[in-house]
């Protein structure tokens, strides 16, 4: 996380914040290490998206250390049902996969992981009490729109910095291919993940 970008937002830039964000990134990378083959040629592209989303969340709100692993798991799985389950209606399978990953030992993280994944394509702001949920929704929207829909208070230069650190490498063409598969899967409901 760039110190200047955090300072511009009035967010603290201290060791605890840096450690929490690094932990979220590490959790996501550990999951990519175990599941890379699931994504095939899209692995590097999806990994960049996951890390840009984590970075954008950190530019909007303080990520508490106790939520860092939760953020990493949710970021990794938020769209993963596309590849794990071969479906464009991917929110329910993505939540199920995240639940399986958490297992019984981390069951207390499930409500927040579920909300982060389930609310991330809501068209209106979320009503969830945890600010991470709305920050995650806005982060995903910013990255999917290539920064055209900015996250609140995040400068264009800060987003471009994340793209430099985690290049897009065909992200939007990958989304277009997935959308085309979705049209074939369900032509009458081409965007099943969107919510009002």
Image (cartoon, helix red, strand yellow):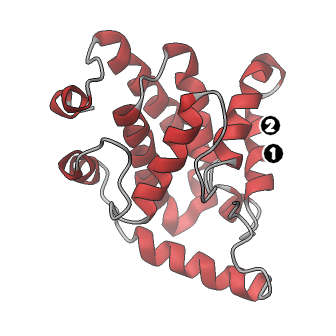
Against 176, residue 55 (above or below) is above
Residue 1 in sight = yes
Against 107, residue 100 (above or below) is below
Q: What residue would you read off at disc 1? A: 96
Contact between labelled residues 2 and 1, with CB atoms less than 8 Å apart: yes
Residue 53, horizontal then vertical, whole percent: 44, 46
Against 41, residue 185 (above or below) is below
Residue 124, horizontal then vertical, whole percent: 60, 54
Q: What residue would you read off at disc 2? A: 100
> Which residue is drawn at the image coordinates 77% and 62% (left, top)?
85
Residue situated in front as seen by the camera: 60 or 174:
60
Q: Residues within 10 Å of mark 1 (few under 14, many from 20)?
A: some
> Which residue is drawn at the image coordinates 49% and 58% (left, top)?
46
Residue 36, horizontal then vertical, whole percent: 56, 52
Residue situated in front as seen by the camera: 160 or 77:
160
Side of 139 relative to 96 (left or right)? left
Mark in front: 1 vs 2: 1
Against 70, residue 137 (above or below) is below
Q: Residue furthest right?
A: 104
SS class of the residue under badge 1? helix
Quarter placement of the N terminus: top left
> Which residue is drawn at the image coordinates 56% and 43% (left, top)?
75
Q: Splitting the image into 4 quarters, where does residue 82 fall?
A: bottom right
């Amino acid at each position: 996380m760039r110190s200047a970008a955090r300072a511009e937002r009035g967010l603290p830039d201290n060791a605890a914040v840096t450690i929490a964000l690094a932990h979220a990134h590490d959790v996501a990378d550990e999951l990519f290490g175990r599941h890379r083959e699931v994504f095939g040629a899209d692995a590097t592209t999806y990994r960049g998206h996951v890390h840009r989303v984590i970075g954008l969340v950190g530019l909007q709100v303080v990520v508490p250390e106790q939520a860092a692993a939760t953020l990493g798991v949710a970021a990794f799985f938020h769209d993963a049902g596309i590849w794990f389950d071969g479906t464009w209606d991917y929110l329910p399978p993505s939540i199920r996969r995240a639940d399986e990953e958490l297992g019984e030992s981390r069951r207390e993280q499930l409500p927040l992981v579920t909300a982060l994944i389930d609310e991330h394509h809501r068209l209106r702001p979320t009503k969830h009490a945890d600010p991470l949920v709305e920050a995650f929704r806005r982060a995903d929207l910013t990255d999917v729109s290539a920064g055209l829909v900015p996250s609140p208070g995040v400068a264009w230069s800060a987003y471009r910095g994340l793209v430099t650190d985690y290049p897009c490498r065909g992200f939007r063409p990958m989304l277009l291919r997935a959308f085309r598969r979705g049209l074939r899967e369900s032509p009458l409901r081409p965007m099943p993940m969107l919510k009002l």
